[in-house]
């Protein structure tokens, strides 16, 4: 529906309202409708799910068409991320937002900072989804409001060509509302709890939910020790629960990202149910670290399983957890991924201990022998020391090729002393092309950084505090923040406008006409940034 069509529809509605609606302006109504393209979270979820489905198909056709996102812990952070994307690249195409359970726990819980162990309020996750989309919709309203003002100026100047150009731009406007991949942890309980939380997240606007195969009440961050996985059937019940939630709410294109933590998880809380040899439960149990039992030497509290006709005792720890055999992580990951895709998941997430294309690609190749179009979401995690990892990868490659590496200490490659070396430069180039290379060679459809804005907030605040509270004083803010905002064209330098002051002024004029008391007059100090 075009801008002029909306005006015509609004005019008909107002005319039907009769005399009591005489003061309502049709074009003002149409402008408010254009500025609020997505009235509900479900409208957003349906729109963004279609975007992701189209992007997945594009990636299948060409792995160069991978997608990216940055993790955001506040609506304003997400808003600025997408405003920046539109500013620098002209389009939000293939750029999403990631909502990290880690950052919700660390930054958004009423308990204060918490570790990534599903101890935060589950309602804080859908609340953050809603907050992010409120800010993204406000970015639309702000930008479109500026276009409406330009349209009025063109009309006042009698420039019909410019007015038509602006109307066309309004009709073709690209929204800031992009897909969110949202972390539902391990479901915060059983399958019913997962379903209930999934509904809240979808109603808030999430089109893609990421769920992991850890035990809900033993959940750990994927890059910490002590991870405990669940048998496949327990995990598949939660995948089904999420699919039911999408279908119930009328979002059939909703995306389920099945995450396996098995690579770094050496423990399980329960032995899987098995009916016959070779079934899924039996295959899970086959990874257990067991000892054959002599019936004459059974000890108190032992648990037994049958394996190939032999009586076996899985090793049980004092924590009452069972241990997997060492070296089985990759095999368990591959089985997790295949079974998840065969039972309703759309994308995979393999949590790894390092960013290594060969390791990831090796597992994906095995998965694709069964599921040819298997695709990954990959965590380009700040938990990895990227500099050290890639310098070590180059060191190892050079050493294997017979190149002299005697000038380097492999354990100390992070040192600044190596920054100007050829090894460091090659490592940086590998980091630069990691996402592109991994999309092509390791089946990674979506690259995300889970916690980038957590770290940028800390770093930028440290730099500001060091300068402002030091000898630079106010210059520490002006030189390093405001002057850079102006020169780099950062919209937030006009913070009143970013917070919605001009939108409010427009509404005041709609509601009160000439009686409107507007904030954007001659004495508004934001006018000092007009040239910015």
Image: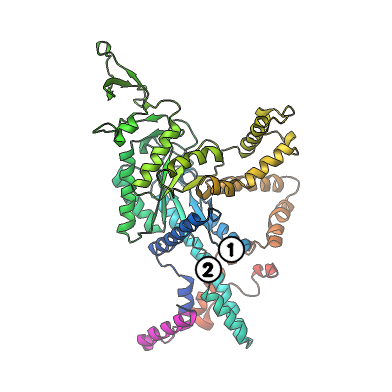
Q: Which mark is drawn over residue 54?
A: none
Q: Residue at x 38, y 49 (%)?
A: 345
The residue that label 1 is drawn on is 86
Does the residue at mark 2 contact the one at mark 1 (Cβ under 8 Å)?
Answer: yes
Residue 353 to residue 304: above or below: below
186 vs 244, nearest the viewer: 244
Q: Residue at x 72, y 51 (%)?
A: 476
What distance separates the C-alpha of mark 2 from that of mark 1?
9 Å
20 vs 81, nearest the viewer: 81
446 lies left or right of 460: left
Secondary-structure class at tag 1: helix
Which quadrant is home to the C terminus?
bottom right
Q: Position of residue 255 (x, y in %)?
A: 40, 54
385 vs 18, nearest the viewer: 385
The residue that label 2 is drawn on is 174
73 lies left or right of 291: right
Which quadrant is home to the N terminus?
bottom left
Of helix, strand and loop, which mostly describes the magenta segment? Answer: helix
Q: Residue at x 27, y 31 (%)?
A: 277
- What are the residue bounds of the magenta stretch? 3-29
């Amino acid at each position: 529906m075009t801008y002029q069509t909306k005006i015509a529809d609004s005019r008909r509605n107002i005319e039907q309202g009769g005399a009591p609606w005489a003061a309502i302006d049709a074009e003002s109504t149409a402008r408010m409708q254009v500025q609020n393209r997505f009235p509900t979270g479900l409208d957003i979820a349906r729109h963004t799910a279609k975007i992701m489905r189209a992007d997945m198909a594009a990636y299948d056709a060409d792995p160069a068409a991978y997608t990216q996102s940055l993790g955001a812990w506040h609506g304003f952070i997400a808003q600025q991320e997408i405003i920046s994307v539109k500013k620098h690249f002209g389009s939000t195409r293939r750029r999403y937002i990631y909502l990290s359970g880690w950052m919700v726990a660390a930054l958004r819980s009423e308990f204060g900072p918490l570790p990534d162990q599903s101890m935060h309020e589950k309602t804080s996750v859908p609340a953050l989804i809603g907050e992010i989309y409120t800010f993204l919709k406000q970015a639309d309203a702000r930008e479109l409001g500026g276009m409406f003002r330009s349209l009025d100026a063109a009309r006042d100047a009698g420039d019909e060509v410019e007015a038509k150009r602006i109307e066309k731009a309004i009709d073709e406007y690209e929204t800031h509302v992009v897909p969110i991949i949202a972390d539902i942890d391990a479901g915060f309980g059983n399958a019913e709890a997962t379903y209930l939380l999934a509904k809240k997240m979808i109603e808030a606007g999430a089109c893609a939910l990421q769920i992991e195969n850890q035990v809900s009440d033993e959940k750990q961050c994927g890059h910490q020790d002590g991870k405990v996985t669940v048998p496949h059937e327990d995990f598949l019940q939660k995948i089904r629960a999420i699919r039911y939630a999408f279908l119930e709410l009328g979002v059939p294109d909703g995306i389920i990202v099945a995450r396996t933590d098995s690579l770094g998880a050496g423990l399980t809380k329960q032995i899987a149910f098995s009916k016959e040899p070779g079934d899924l439960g039996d295959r899970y149990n086959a990874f257990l670290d067991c000892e054959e039992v002599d019936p004459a030497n059974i000890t108190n509290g032992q648990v037994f399983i049958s394996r190939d006709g032999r009586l076996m005792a899985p090793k049980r720890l004092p924590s009452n957890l069972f241990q997997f055999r060492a070296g089985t992580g990759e095999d368990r990951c591959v089985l997790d991924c295949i079974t998840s895709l065969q039972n309703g998941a759309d994308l995979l997430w393999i949590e790894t201990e390092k960013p290594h294309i060969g390791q990831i690609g090796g597992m994906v190749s095995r998965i694709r022998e069964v599921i040819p179009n298997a695709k990954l979401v990959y965590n380009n995690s700040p938990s990895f020391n990227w500099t050290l990892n890639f310098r070590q990868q180059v060191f190892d490659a050079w050493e294997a090729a017979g190149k002299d590496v005697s000038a380097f200490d492999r354990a100390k490659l992070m040192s600044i002393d190596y920054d100007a070396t050829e090894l460091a430069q090659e490592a940086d180039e590998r980091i630069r092309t990691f996402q592109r290379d991994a999309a092509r060679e390791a089946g990674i459809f979506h690259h995300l950084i889970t916690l980038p804005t957590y770290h940028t907030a800390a770093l930028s605040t440290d730099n500001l505090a060091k300068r402002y509270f030091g000898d630079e004083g106010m210059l520490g803010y002006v030189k390093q923040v405001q002057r850079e905002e102006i020169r780099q064209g950062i919209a937030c330098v006009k913070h009143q406008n970013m917070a919605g002051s001009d939108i409010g002024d427009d509404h005041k004029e709609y509601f009160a006409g000439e009686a409107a008391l507007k904030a954007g007059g001659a004495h508004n100090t934001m006018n000092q940034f007009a040239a910015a």
